[in-house]
Image (cartoon, grey):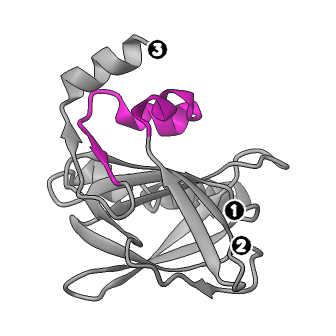
Amino acid sequence: MKMPILVISLLLLSGCFSPQRAFENDPGTYGLYVATTNIFTNSDVVVQREGDGKVYVLKNKHIYAGDTSAYVMASLPPGRYHLETYNPDGRTNYPINTPNGWFEVQANCFNYGGHYDFGQGADGMPTYKNVTTLQDIASMPGHYRDLADGRDICSATMGQPSERLAADDVAKVLTNL
């Protein structure tokens, strides 16, 4: 009898630590950051917040085995974040040192980072391309996309200031797809 109670308790507790929980509980203090990557393992992307230097580890998760797209989701305090490292193989952290390797997060907003296409340059160092298109939110899996419903959307495009689109305008754009 103790085992089922323990399992239920652990499941309830794990729900308290979901990546969107802080955003859902306190949207005035947090923004929800969501992006798609081509990193093929469930691994980490590390970012550092400008100003206080606090480091955040963002989990890169695949929904389906063999899926080429993974998703990063985290509740983050507002601010500017710099990409520090990413882990393409689950073992090695590679530094990312580019002048435009930053994005902004706004509070009370679904901060959409778009699609990150990580690769390797001729010098062997990591490279990435970032494309942010609002329509891509419509093609995200439901449990990611649903978090944007009724919310303002903020672009979290690399190397560009964040732009906020009001929830009413978002609904019009996504409805017309």
The earlier-in-sequence mark between 1 and 2 is 1
Q: Which mark is residue 39?
A: 1
Q: Is residue 49 left or right of residue 92?
A: left
Please identify the residue farthest to the top as the structure is shown. Answer: 176
Instruction: Give yes or no for residue 41 being in the magenta stretch.
Output: no
Question: Residue 117 lies in what quarter of the image?
Answer: bottom right
Residue receiving disc 3: 177
Residue receiving disc 2: 88
Most foreground residue, 32 or 98: 98
Tell me the kind of residue under disc 1.
Answer: Ile
Where residue 121 appears, x then y in whole percent? 68, 76
Label 3: element kind: loop
Where residue 39 appears, x then y in whole percent? 69, 62
Image position of 78 with respect to 170: above or below: below
Tell me the kind of residue under disc 2.
Answer: Pro
The CA span between labels 3 and 1 is 27 Å
Please tell me how many numbered marks the rendered image carries. 3
Q: Mark 1 near mark 2, Cβ–Cβ under 8 Å? A: yes
Q: Which residues are magenta?
A: 133-156
Label 2: element kind: loop
Mark 1 burial class by Cα count in 10 Å: few <14, some 14-19, many 20+: many
